[in-house]
Structures are given as structure tokens and as C-alpha cells.
Image (spheres, rainbow, N blue to C red):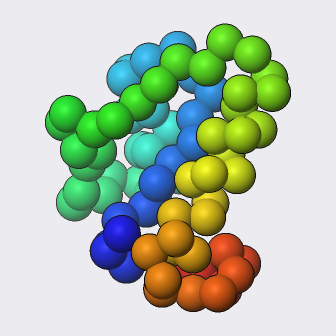
């Protein structure tokens, strides 16, 4: 996981919603989402919690920090 990678956890209905959110939050950034990025539809709330915990611990698994809260 590179420091320039920023995973996002969305609860939306697709690509158009992500683009709209990006523009609202960041204005008109020079970057965009990876065109063939990994995404997954979560159907149950317990799965969503598990995926969120897994994602936020990526820097820990990569050995970049000891605790996920240390990651910027």
C-alpha cells in the first residue's frame, strides 16, 4: 500500500455517485478513481463492518504502522 493510495468506503449506487461525491468534497481534483479499481457490493451489515475493519488495517498488514490510527 503506497502512501499515495487512499481507499474509500462508499455506500452508494455506483460510479456516478462516487464522481459526484469526489467533486463535492475535493472540488475538481486532478486525480480520479482507478478505472478498473476493486469494488464489492456488500449485502449485509455485518459484512460491511468486517470489510471496513479489513480495509483500515491495510497499512498495518503492510508493516507501515503498528496501529491503523497512525496512518494519515
From the viewer's perspective, is 35 left or right of 18?
left
From the viewer's perspective, is 29 left or right of 39?
left
Image coords of residue 33 (percent x, y): 29, 44
From the viewer's perspective, is 64 left or right of 19?
right
Image coords of residue 52 (percent x, y): 67, 46
User: Residue at coordinates 37% horizontally, 78% vertically from top-left?
Assistant: 3
Q: Is residue 28 above or below residue 37?
A: below
Residue nearest the viewer, comparing 43 with 30: 43
Label tally:
0
Image coords of residue 6 (percent x, y): 43, 62
- Quarter of the image for residue 34 reads top left
From the viewer's perspective, is 28 left or right of 72?
left
Determine if residue 12 is in view.
yes
Which quarter of the image is occupied by the C terminus?
A: bottom right
Residue nearest the viewer, comparing 35 with 2: 2
Image coords of residue 61 (percent x, y): 52, 70
User: Residue at coordinates 71% horizontally, 31% vertically from top-left?
Assistant: 48
User: Residue at coordinates 38% horizontally, 21% vertically from top-left?
Assistant: 16
Q: Is residue 19 above or below residue 27?
A: above
Residue nearest the viewer, comparing 41 with 8: 41
Which quarter of the image is occupied by the N terminus?
A: bottom left
Residue nearest the viewer, comparing 27 with 54: 54
Q: Is residue 69 above or below residue 33?
A: below
Determine if residue 24 is in view.
no
Q: Residue furthest right?
A: 46
Amino acid at each position: 500500500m503506497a502512501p499515495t493510495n487512499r481507499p474509500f468506503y462508499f455506500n452508494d449506487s455506483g460510479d456516478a455517485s462516487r464522481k459526484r461525491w469526489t467533486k463535492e468534497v475535493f472540488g475538481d481534483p486532478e486525480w480520479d478513481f482507478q478505472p478498473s479499481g476493486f469494488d464489492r457490493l456488500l449485502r449485509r451489515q455485518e459484512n460491511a463492518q468486517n470489510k471496513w475493519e479489513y480495509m483500515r488495517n491495510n497499512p498495518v498488514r503492510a508493516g507501515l504502522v503498528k496501529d491503523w490510527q497512525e496512518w494519515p
